[in-house]
Image: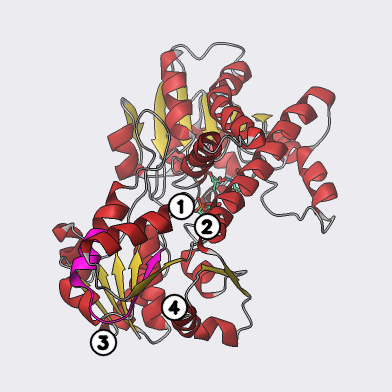
Amino acid sequence: MRVAMIGTGYVGLVSGACFADFGHHVTCIDKNADKIEQLRSGGVPIYEPGLDLLIERNVREGRLDFETDLTEAVKAADVVFIAVGTPSRRGDGHADLSYVYAAAEEIAKAMDGFTVVVTKSTVPVGTGDEVEAVIRKTRPDAQFAVVSNPEFLREGAAIEDFKRPDRVVVGVEDDQAREVMRELYRPLFLNETPIVFTARRTSELIKYAANAFLAMKITFINEMADLCEAVGADVQQVAKGIGLDNRIGGKFLHAGPGYGGSCFPKDTLALTRTAQEYDSPVRLVETVVEINDARKAAMADKVIKACDGDVSGKTVAVLGLTFKPNTDDMRDAPSLDIIPALQKAGAKIKAYDPAGALEAEKLLHDVEMTTGAYLCAEDADVMVIITEWNEFRALDLDRVRECMKGSILVDLRNIYDPADMAERGFKYVSIGR
Ligand code: UDX
């Protein structure tokens, strides 16, 4: 099959490369000429383990190419994916759909023969109807169907998630388009991946409901962690004890500084806005959004408390800036709330992140970036772990202790053992233990 992928952001680029790896011919299109140039010359604009090799192989074998103009690729395509950004709109928290509709109009002008237009971007309920209307208006004669096919991949594990998903969700109301989608995903069905066919609006809502549920699970365990601290219980054990119940499940019960990233914060907020608009508010999700926002700020207070209430003039070494490990993505990262709050309280910040330093430097001010964990620890009064990169799990903690001036370690990801840390002479503070 021939696929045109509009938008080479996270979802577009990973999906495009993976569809090519399934054996389809894929053209990835982006208006950003620098990005396309970089991709053509073998570079990859995002940090994602394994993606460079996957792109390289599929380009070499002639199944994947890159364009700035969509006309030719859309004309030849059986399936056109819209995978452009849907950021939070400034002011009201609704998803900004201007890129989606602009893409739909351009696609309409170029398409030729029966074309399946698929929204892969996370879009509010009803967007498929709107995309259909835009195309119909632009090209009244066009033969097409609009399908919703949300993407559930996680950053840092994107290729594995795309190729071995728990399920594929397809919102489609046209028989011919349903068969095209079945054919597109055929390699997955050979692995017995379940495919859920639904109406288009249902599929659009599934994506938001899934993200909101996961965000709620994290927020629940974060609140349990606070309660554990208050009553003298251990949140890791609570998570294990409840997670072994199959009805609950053990995943996404890791307490931390609050969820961040490109999806949960924007999608939970957008869901609350949609629900309010339809006069059917989702109060549980509204509360999750509030609690998570407050939590990020509260983490700075936790550090200050660990320093006996005062960080003024103290040097805080921060390990991990990205919203999670194995990515250079800084979007809504808890570090962006925690670090400025510590600075406001008078702290001097040194930081180290294995991949996010460049991005972080654009977003944070007056932070001394270092190139390694021990350099970061040098002469620090307190060390704070914000992101659980694997290399932090493997640190020589005695060496860290020797590098530091003070002995306070605040671990917002629970990656060390409290008893072991005490033995090594740290004043160790973690989450919910
Ligand atoms: C998420 C969804 O998992 C994915 O299905 C969707 O397509 C996009 O959004 P992603 O944002 O890449 O993926 O990362 P994820 O691993 O889900 O983590 C999101 C945030 O939650 C991170 O800040 C992470 O640190 C936090 N988190 C996750 C926790 O604090 N505890 C957990 O147990 C799990």
Q: Earlier in the sequence, mark 4 or mark 1?
A: 1
Task: Find the distance from the CA under tag 2 to the CA under tag 4.
Answer: 16 Å
**Residue 240 image point, x, y percent:** 80, 50
**Residue at the spot of label 2:** 201
Looking at this rendering, what residue extends furthest in the front direction? 140
Sequence-wise, which precedes: disc 2 or disc 4?
A: 4
Q: Does dot 3 land on a helix, a strand or a loop?
A: loop
Residue 394 is situated, as x and y percent measured from the top left of the image, at: 57, 52
What residue is disc 3 on? 62
Tell me: residue 161, above or below residue 204: below
Q: Marks 1/2: CA distance?
A: 6 Å
Query: Which mark's residue is nearer the viewer, 2 or 3?
Result: 2
Q: Quadrant of residue 27?
A: bottom left
Under circle 1, the secondary element is loop
- Horizontal side, residue 427 vs residue 155: left or right: right
**Separation of disc 4 and disc 1 at Cα?**
18 Å
Q: Nearer the viewer, mark 3 or mark 1?
A: 1
- Mark 4 CB lies closer than 8 A to ligand 1: no
| Start-end of magenta stretch | 104-119
Residue beneath disc 1: 126
